[in-house]
Amino acid sequence: MTDDQEVAGLGARLREHRLAGRLTLEGAAARVGLSPAYLSRLETGRRQPSLPVLLGLARAYGTTVAGLLGEQPGEPDPVVRGGAIEPGRAGGWGYRRAGAQGRAMQALRVHVPPSVQDAVVRVHPGEEWLYVLRGRLRLTLGEGVHLLDEGDSAHFDSLTPHCIAAESPAGVELLFLHTLLQSPGGELCLGDSPRI
């Protein structure tokens, strides 16, 4: 960025972020490897920062370059288009995102193959809901075993030990929702699948 390419309000945003982080000019400048005088000129709009300086300031202030530039993030697209579920590396289980990213809940379409089943019983914080689209599902919840047919659903606390398996010869296809609670054990409870 050159001096003649001013970004409206950039200096004020730089100052706001620095003050929000309770940093002095000297402290913020030291974090980024600038002189306090140069940072002061950036904040007053007498200078425009280069991209490396913007990146350093964004990191120091715990924000993004887009945030420093005043760009407003757009609303995430609420529509997720359908498509085929491709078998994954986790014993043939297939996954397709069915919900938006960055939400408190994750929605997936899942295909559980009929042969190799995940024998690992999962326990983790959160809630799960599943709906059988095609086939027959064996859902083990604690000591209970439930057989679900097409159109059946289940909603349960993920702290209940649980295991999912296909009972039909062609496997089972599910619509699957779970909350994304951050915890050491908060992993996708459908086996050792790739992170989505």
Image (cartoon, helix red, strand yellow):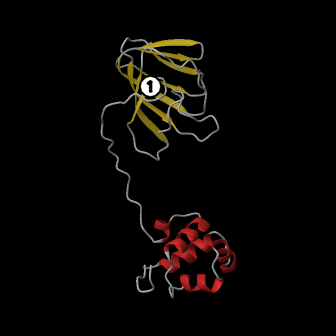
Residue position for label 1 = 93
Q: Position of residue 44 (x, y in %)?
A: 54, 86
Q: Position of residue 27 (x, y in %)?
A: 69, 75
Q: Secondary structure at mark 1?
A: loop
State the residue at coordinates (35%, 30%).
85
Extreme bottom residue here?
46
Q: Position of residue 144 (x, y in %)?
A: 55, 12
Where 98 falls versus 133 (above or below)? below
State the residue at coordinates (50%, 29%).
128
Question: Which of the pair 106/59 is nearer the observer?
Answer: 59
Where 130 falls versus 80 (above or below)? above
Number of numbered discs: 1
Q: Quadrant of residue 25?
A: bottom right
Residue flagged by tag 1: what amino acid is it?
Answer: Trp
Is disc 1 surrounded by few (<14), some (14 to 19) or many (20+) residues within 10 Å?
many
Where 96 falls versus 55 (above or below)? above
Question: Which of the pair 181/6 is nearer the observer?
Answer: 6
